[in-house]
Amino acid sequence: MARLLFPLPIAAAAASSIHLAAARFRHPVVSVARREALFGGRAPARLATRGVSAGGSAARAGTVIGPEEALEWVKSDRRRLLHVVYRVGDLDKTIKFYTECLGMKLLRKRDIPEERYTNAFLGYGPEDSHFVVELTYNYGVESYDIGSGFGHFGIAVEDVEKTVELIKAKGGTVTREPGPVKGGKSVIAFIEDPDGYKFELIERGPTPEPLCQVMLRVGDLDRAINFYEKAFGMELLRKKDNPQYKYTIAMMGYGPEDKNAVLELTYNYGVKEYDKGNAYAQIAIGTDDVYKTAEVVRQNGGQITREPGPLPGISTKITACTDPDGWKSVFVDNLDFLKELEE
């Protein structure tokens, strides 16, 4: 897929979340365990498309869905945050930091020499049931510009102080010592990884989803909330204004914060645009129907950057888009994603 969407080497990560080698032509049966992990034991729903068969690709791209149907469907679509994708300059160094300091596990690693990049997938549990990090190393690129728009990743830990002590002992950088969050009571700390990505450590009890947040800055919070509700089917979990510090946050997601990864949108008073740099790439989200997803995104002001359909030579169906602030996302067919994990 990287060959289809983005020039290399800088942007290989933006496509790699659903990249499959062209040699994969078989269509393995998805195990019952994999289905249940992603769908809770339920088969994914497929909605009819006007005048075409379920297997059509070019025709399916012409999916028609009315605004009322779109609003209902997007809320019932089985969506989940799958990966967050970003670029690093030294893959082995980053893997070592994430496993030794943050307690993640290296789930899998793949090298794509013909396209000159390597991916590593790390997280706190299997990809079919957890939100995970997808690191991309582009051959020969040692540094990236994170920009001012990307904020941080959030990790829930049971003891922030002990985690910070461990990170310091391993030579990690702590940019904010443990203490209550501004304007609140939650105990947090901030650290930086070897590439300068910030992680917020959030003191919280045991949770099934320790990798719990991606924070992005937006120029119009109400517009962003409306888009993610209607186009992405997310729920506004909470919204908090902090006039003393001149910012407002909105937590968006597919379930409660203590059990699911969420998107934290931040609006800083008076700031309408941000530099996005070239380091952070995108989030990948599962969907039952990439065709309807693309149509709903269009209806709600998003830009489709990759038309929905299967990748040439393989069966994985995807669509890619940007939100009104220019942040990228890729939607991946749920069953096709499970097939990739089975291989």
Image (cartoon, helix red, strand yellow):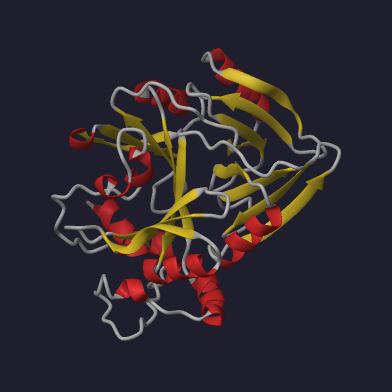
The picture places residue 202, in percent across and down from the top left corner, at 66, 36
> Depth check: 261 or 162 in front?
261
Q: Is residue 40 visible?
A: no
Q: Which of 331/60 is in front?
A: 60
Image point 49% across, 70% down: which residue? 296
206 sits left or right of 37 in the view: right
Above or below 183: residue 337? below
Tell which residue pokes out farthest to the right in this image.
Answer: 244
Q: Is residue 50 left or right of residue 24?
A: right
Q: How many marks?
A: 0
For residue 44, what is the image quadrant? bottom left
In this view of the protein, can residue 332 be seen by the observer?
A: yes
Q: Nearer the viewer, residue 123 or 266?
A: 266
Residue 21 at x, y percent in the picture? 19, 47
Q: Where is 273 relative to 71, above or below?
A: above
Q: Quadrant of residue 332?
A: bottom left
**Above or below, comparing residue 196 to residue 73 in the picture:** above
Which residue is at 27% across, 59% downward?
A: 316
User: For the point 46% across and 23% down, which residue is it?
Assistant: 97
**Side of 176 where 308 appears, left or right:** left
**Which residue is pictured at 43% across the width and 44% down the height?**
125
**Image height check: is 189 above or below 149?**
above
Instruction: Kindly indicate the quadrant of the structure image that contains residue 206.
Output: top right
Front residue (pair 240, 157): 240
Q: Position of residue 233 (x, y in %)?
A: 55, 65
Picture coordinates of residue 253 (x, y %)? 59, 56
